[in-house]
Image (tube, rainbow, N blue to C red):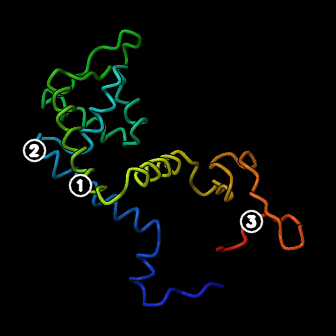
Amino acid sequence: MASAPAGGPSESLTGRTGYRLMMLGERLKAAAVETLAALGVRPRHFNVLAALASGQAPSQQDLSRMLTIDPNVMVSLIDDLEQLGLAERQANPRDRRRHAIVLTKAGRRVLADGAALIDAAERRIFGHLSADELAVLHDVSGRLLTAPWGPSAEPAGPHEPAGKPGGGQQPARQADGAGRHSSRAGSGPG
């Protein structure tokens, strides 16, 4: 059984990867809120505008699923964007029961301006990382966001891509002093 880290609860908390990611997420959200306020929108508004930029004219339900936002909240967000003149509901020619949500010209301007502001904020936050470190962070966070999760999800092994048990690379093997090969997976720090 592993012993608790020395120094008490605050050190054990900051030693947790999940806690660090939550704190980083809170910093990023605060920066986005502050940055986008100049344009009169919040981060969720910006995310909806970005999703609409695909040009596919999704429905509110599609946007809700795409952005994992509660459908009732999505209705309010679309209402806000309509009031601001940034998006509009249009009749969906393929399904009269649904509305397609489209960007307006003003919405495209706010999206472009917001993207430039968010890019600048991210440069300030991630400016302490090298380009290679930022690429690794981007890759790892993307894999974590697309990995299965929840009570029934099984974590991938050390050399398996998430979501593909048994489908990953075989663990690297190395010869021990007697010429026998052993797996390095699970051999501890080395």
Which mark is on residue 38? 2
**Mark 3 or mark 2, earlier in chain:** 2
Residue under the point 48% across and 47% down: 139
Dividing the picture into quarters, in which one does residue 88 lie? top left
Asked if residue 172 lies left or right of residue 116, the reply is: right
Residue under the point 22% across and 54% down: 31
Residue under the point 41% across and 29% down: 62
Residue under the point 71% across and 47% down: 168
Q: Is residue 49 above or below residue 19?
A: above
**Mark 1 or mark 2, earlier in chain:** 2
| Front residue of 167 and 64 | 167
Q: Residue flagged by tag 2: what amino acid is it?
A: Ala
In front of the other: label 3 or label 2?
3
Residue 140, percent across and down? 50, 51
Q: Residue flagged by tag 3: what amino acid is it?
A: Arg
Secondary structure of the residue carrying tag 3 is loop
Asked if residue 174 lies left or right of residue 94, the reply is: right
Secondary structure of the residue carrying tag 2 is loop
Asked if residue 110 lies left or right of residue 17, the reply is: left
Q: Residues within 10 Å of mark 3 (few under 14, many from 20)?
A: some
Compute the Cα span from label 3 to label 1. Answer: 39 Å
Residue 4, percent across and down? 53, 86
Which mark is on residue 184? 3
Compute the Cα span from label 1 to label 2. Answer: 18 Å
Dividing the picture into quarters, in which one does residue 151 lie? bottom right
Which residue is outermost to the top?
A: 93
Secondary structure of the residue carrying tag 1 is helix
Q: Which residue is mark 1?
A: 124
